[in-house]
Amino acid sequence: MKLNELKPSPGARRKRKRIGRGRGSGYGGTSGRGHKGQKSRSGGSIPAWFEGGQMPLVRRVPKRGPRRIAHKRFEYDVVNVKTLNLFEEEMEVNPQLLREHGIIKRKNALIKILGDGDLDKRLNVRAHRFSKSAIEKIQAKGGTAEVI
């Protein structure tokens, strides 16, 4: 006997269930679905996690421990380069000074300098972040852009 000659013995393979072919077939009438109920109806499938309307396990178990936060988000108070023109030449501009002049309202806010507008003075600016265009404009006037 060779592998390609193997086959099941006669009657070993089960015949396909022919549903709805009369009482004599054994699957007539209700077609093997029993009487009434959700599973007897067409399209009546129930998800594996369904608990019959009972409050689901995941909702009734108390929640403990820290929740996973996808990423830590930083919010910056934005200051444009044109706003820095109100300071005097050669001045060091820092978050505290911006707060004193009322440019920034929040107390411990992170500050980002953006490059909108033109800078007329040479300033040394200290902030948490800078845009590329802001750095270029500050350095073009001979000032410095220092990241805190």
Image (cartoon, helix red, strand yellow):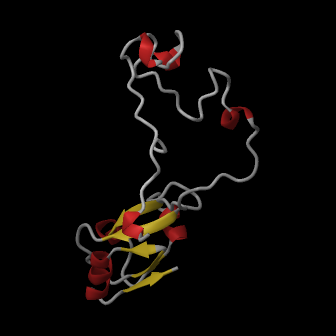
The answer to which of 34 and 131 lies nearer the viewer is 34
Identity of the residue furthest to the left in this view: 118
| 51, above or below 88, in the image | above
**Left or right of 13 on screen, residue 21:** left
| 90, above or below 81, in the image | below
| 104, above or below 121, in the image | above
Question: Whole-percent x and y of residue 35?
Answer: 53, 10
The residue sitting at 55% across, 68% down in the picture is 96
- Number of numbered labels in the structure image: 0
Quadrant of the rendering where the N terminus is positioned? bottom left
**Is any atom of residue 75 visible in this view?**
yes
**Is any atom of residue 121 visible in this view?**
no
The residue sitting at 51% across, 16% down in the picture is 38
The answer to which of 77 and 62 lies nearer the viewer is 62
The residue sitting at 42% across, 56% down in the picture is 7
Question: Whole-percent x and y of residue 100?
Answer: 52, 63
The residue sitting at 53% across, 32% down in the picture is 47
Question: Whole-percent x and y of residue 129?
Answer: 43, 74
**Left or right of 11 on screen, residue 5:** left
**Left or right of 68 on screen, residue 125:** left
Identity of the residue furthest to the bottom in this view: 142
Question: Whole-percent x and y of residue 6?
Answer: 42, 62
